[in-house]
Amino acid sequence: MTYCVGMRLNAGLIFMSDTRTNAGVDNISTVKKMHTWEVPGERMIVIMTAGNLATTQSAISLLDERAKAPEDRNPSLLQAPSMFQIAREVGRTLREVIADNATTGQEADGAFGATLIVGGQIAGAPPRLFLIYPEGNFIEASDDTPFFQIGEAKYGKPILVRAHDPEMSFEDAVKLLMVSFDSTIKSNLSVGLPLDYVTYNSDSLQIEHAARVESDDPYYQTVSNGWGEALKLAFQQLPPFKFED
């Protein structure tokens, strides 16, 4: 399993993913699930992956190869005229990989399923964020749905729903996502550090910040410990419940 979040802010886009992959409790490894493409001044694209590792790696490799080989551009991520077209291309590629691996060749077999988050901006258009389903179709983030989660989403969603503010800074957004990821990591062994994150300022057409948060990162430890203590304090400050006589 995995956990990835892509979020819209008024200032731009922010992405965060874990790196844990496992095939049992005794077979755990670290795999990068966030992939970026840049043409500074022209476009910036981020894709995060969740699901069958062979499927996601095949899809990303195929997209990367088509971005490099002119004869395979139909269109490539680096030539598509809009983020909508990029989402369509990513969806087609994902569906193609799943169909090639599925036993029937026709259905998106659950064993080979994957879900992707795609976001970025192309010069002359606003930043956009999409959630790509295994069938290749997709939906777009909006004011009503300002973030997407893939993978083990349920544990980290409540904090995002309660605390997300489109006006928040990237610094506050990183803090918010760290709390969401910490809640997920504490609830599910299939999600774990290190965490990767990318921030993107609207119209900059290049990645603003990209970093990896290791398990011994002092700030992450402060957030993790502080959030736990803050929850205990908040609970204690709630009015007491009393049984009716």
Image: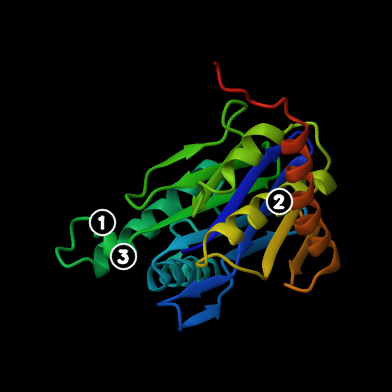
In the structure shown, which secondary structural element does the residue marked by tag 3 occupy?
helix
Left or right: 84, with 113 as reference point: right
Residue at point 50%, 61% (across, down): 49
Please state which amino acid type lies under the numbered disc 3.
Phe
Camera-side residue of 244 and 25 = 244
Please state which amino acid type lies under the numbered disc 1.
Ala
Q: Residue 152 has which mark?
A: none
Q: Are marks 1 and 3 in contact (CB under 8 Å)?
A: yes
- Residue 141 visible: yes
For the residues marked 1 and 3, what is the alpha-carbon distance in whole angstroms? 7 Å
Camera-side residue of 29 and 13 = 29
Camera-side residue of 203 and 116 = 116
Left or right: 103, with 139 as reference point: left
Determine which residue is flagged by label 2: 179
Determine which residue is flagged by label 1: 108
Left or right: 108, with 219 as reference point: left
Residue at point 67%, 32% (across, down): 162
Residue at point 50%, 67% (across, down): 190
Determine which residue is flagged by label 3: 112
Residue 148 image-quadrant placement: top right
**147 relative to 100, above or below:** above
* Residue ranking furthest to the front: 245
Residue 185 image-quadrant placement: bottom right
Q: Are marks 2 and 3 in contact (CB under 8 Å)?
A: no
Residue 202 at x, y percent in the picture? 77, 42
**222 relative to 193, above or below:** above
Residue at point 46%, 83% (across, down): 27
Neighbourhood count class around disc 3 (C-alpha, 10 Å): few under 14, some 14–19, many 20 upward: many
In the structure shown, which secondary structural element does the residue marked by tag 2 occupy?
helix
For the residues marked 2 and 1, what is the alpha-carbon distance in whole angstroms? 33 Å
In the structure shown, which secondary structural element does the residue marked by tag 1 occupy?
loop
Camera-side residue of 136 and 217 = 217
